[in-house]
Amino acid sequence: MELTHVALVIADIGGYTRFIKLHKTALLHAQEIISQLIEAVIDRAAVPLTLNKLEGDAALLFAVTGDADATAAGDIARQVTAFFSAFHAKARELSGSRASCPCDACQHILDLKLKAVLHHGVVAIKKIRQFEELTGEDVILVHRLLKNGVSKPEYILMTSSFHRLAGDLPGYQSERSEETYDALGRIETVVLSPALAAAGQLPVPDCA
């Protein structure tokens, strides 16, 4: 086991719990839709970003970085904007291809939204066979940040530690905020939301 500086990313489908709860009669279709949307998102991840695990309606990704690697942080932030484009393109595709299905799940695909949390910190990486388990306070923090006070349906939330490296994103409005959690205290954040139409209409950045 070793301590390593990493960038942590969680891409989370908003509305998932309500989507499943309200559409139990179409549970199979709902699960298929969520799976395809998550796959569309993680397919856009590239080096240095790696999928660590799927967590129901969310994906945890990470990248090993230096303690102040602005280049890697900027690249990861651009990749995350591409997650939104991929998510909305797949949602529109599924909505069209499933339009003839009368079940509630297939009729409410476009109600689903995407949010992402980005953080830079230190984790312990435990290797068990071919799997890598990330542990530590920063892993707990990035998960806690999914429960926040942001009222927007779609956004990118960066901790101040990540934002100091990556900076703002073209086409996004930034707003400084903070969250407070028991045992973790006050966390300074920056919330970025699309300034150009809907998230799904933003241009896909060149992440090469």
Image (spheres, helix red, strand yellow):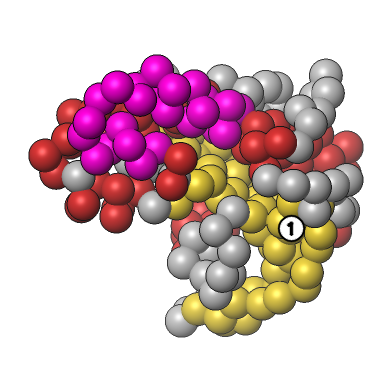
* Residue 105, quarter of the rendered image: top left
Q: Please name the residue shown 44% across and 22% down the image.
A: 96
Residue furthest out toward the left: 25
Question: In the image, 142: left or right of 79?
Answer: left
> What secondary structure do most residues of the magenta stretch adopt?
helix
Magenta-colored stretch includes residue 98: yes
Q: Quadrant of the C terminus?
A: top right
Please name whichever residue, 208 or 150, is drawn nearer the observer in this view of the structure.
150
Magenta-colored stretch includes residue 31: no
x, y percent for residue 56: 33, 41
Please name whichever residue, 22 or 44, is drawn nearer the observer in this view of the structure.
22
**Neighbour class for label 1 at 10 Å: few (<14), some, many (≥20)?**
many
Q: Is residue 201 visible?
A: yes
Residue linked to disc 1:
192
Amino acid marked by disc 1: Leu
The magenta segment? 86-109
x, y percent for residue 136: 50, 56
Q: Is residue 123 above or below residue 87?
A: below
